[in-house]
Image (cartoon, rainbow, N blue to C red):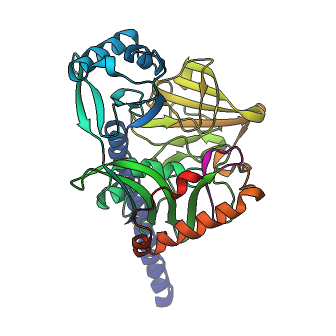
Amino acid sequence: MSRGFVILILCVGVAGAVLLGFVFEQRLATADEYHRQVRLALEEAKRIREQVILPQHEKLSAGQNLKAALEKFGLSAQEAAGASAAAQHAFNLRQLRAGNSITVGRSVEGRLREIDYKIDSDRMLKIVPEEGGFAAHVSEIPLKTEIVAVTGRVDDSLFNAVEDARESPELALRLAQIFGYDLDFSTDPRHGDTFRMVLEKRKYLDGQTAGYGKILAAEYENAGRRYQALLFHDPAGRPGYYAADGKSLAKAFLRSPLKFGAPVTSHFSRSRFHPILKIYRPHLGTDYGAPVGTPVQTIGSGRVLFAGRKSGEGNMIEIAHFSGYKTRYLHLSRMFVHPGERVEIGRTIGLVGSTGLATGPHLDFRILERGQYKNFEKLSLPPSDPVAKRNWPDFAAAREKWLPLLRNPGLLEANAGDSNAERTH
């Protein structure tokens, strides 16, 4: 054996060892990244459940008492009676006025978190559930609304980035809802992404934040691509978000059945090795490796066809949408809807679990078009109608007013005090 041949063999061996080492290192890095994403998903799911409150608003009708009003919000007769009894200790309910607003706030799971009744321009009656009943008190209403700019950089998650900007997690959820038709905030965010918002912030006299109003304009830069949104009204007069060219951001479906933090663990496939059955068979959905308790949202409006236990699918919800589309949400730990119920796009319908044939907690999401399974990750759907031609002058004026503030918040000083411009739209 020649010396050159021996050297060649040694070089090949060394190169092979280096390659194997590199492959092993890459697998470790991939595993570490996956576990990091799962950890972030678990943290975000917990914060969404604990901190985010979704409000529902109504006005008190003439002759209506508080108990009857609360029952219209979906509270049981016992809950409504308990809340009314607690409220009576803080405020004389005989002084309720027709036309005043009532707001009921719930968690994404549908749990009652707070009830607010606006007494007058200065006072709010607040009712909150507590162990064994309810507590109530009268509090000061925020005295001013300011237009402010909020900016941030994503290092790991949008939730953390919003908190780093010293703002409430509510803004992370609302930003994800605005861009949720184009971006999947479970998988799309990248280290170094940035966001900008111009919004109404309600403050008390001492300067403390009391809450948020409208997000007038927003921007999210993802992996070098910029997405922008401007609040305007659709042809029917309803508020919605539009790109700078007047195209609606809204589409028929959202890009993800989860609001945040869930890596895709298994893609759509005509032949996948099943980890429990140990056979190759089609996997006609997308698996998201989310922890138990992660809120699951319907990607589109529709009617619930099925909500219950179904063999290997575990707890499953099936929803019928427009033009023959159906969606299915499998392996849920909890379900918050029932057959026949109408649901709106983005509503929380259940929680991730591991029921049925599942090796661990995840969501198996499936979409069908006229009975045929489709690959949701590659599905393309038409957008909603753009800004109507008759409304274009108003839209152009709003665009010139708000979009420049995303990049130059200093211009806000020139618009100080003008928080009502968008209310005319």
- Residue at screen point 67% across, 48% down: 251
Taking 52 as reference, is 372 left or right?
Answer: right
Image quadrant where residue 95 sits: top left
Residue in the foreground of this view, choosing between 59 and 127:
59
**Residue 217 coordinates in the image, percent (x, y):** 52, 60
| 323 is higher (above) or lower (below) than 200 | above
Q: Is residue 105 above or below residue 250?
A: above
- Kindly identify the residue that appears in the image at 41 percent across and 19 percent down: 70
Task: Decide if residue 261 is in sight here.
Answer: no
Q: Per the image, is 353 magenta?
A: no
Q: Nearer the viewer, residue 92 or 228?
A: 92
310 on left or right of 358? right
Residue at (61%, 41%) from the top-left corner? 272
Image location of residue 342, percent across then percent down: 61, 25
User: Image check: 205 left or right of 74?
Assistant: left
- Assess whether residue 235 is covered by the magenta stretch: yes
Magenta stretch: dominant secondary structure: loop
* Position above or below: 380 against 257: below
Q: Nearer the viewer, residue 223 or 424?
A: 424
Question: Which residues make up the magenta segment?
Answer: 234-244
Q: Position of residue 406 (x, y in %)?
A: 48, 69
- Residue 304 sits in which quadrant? top right
Q: Where residue 51 sits in the image (x, y, percent)?
A: 32, 40
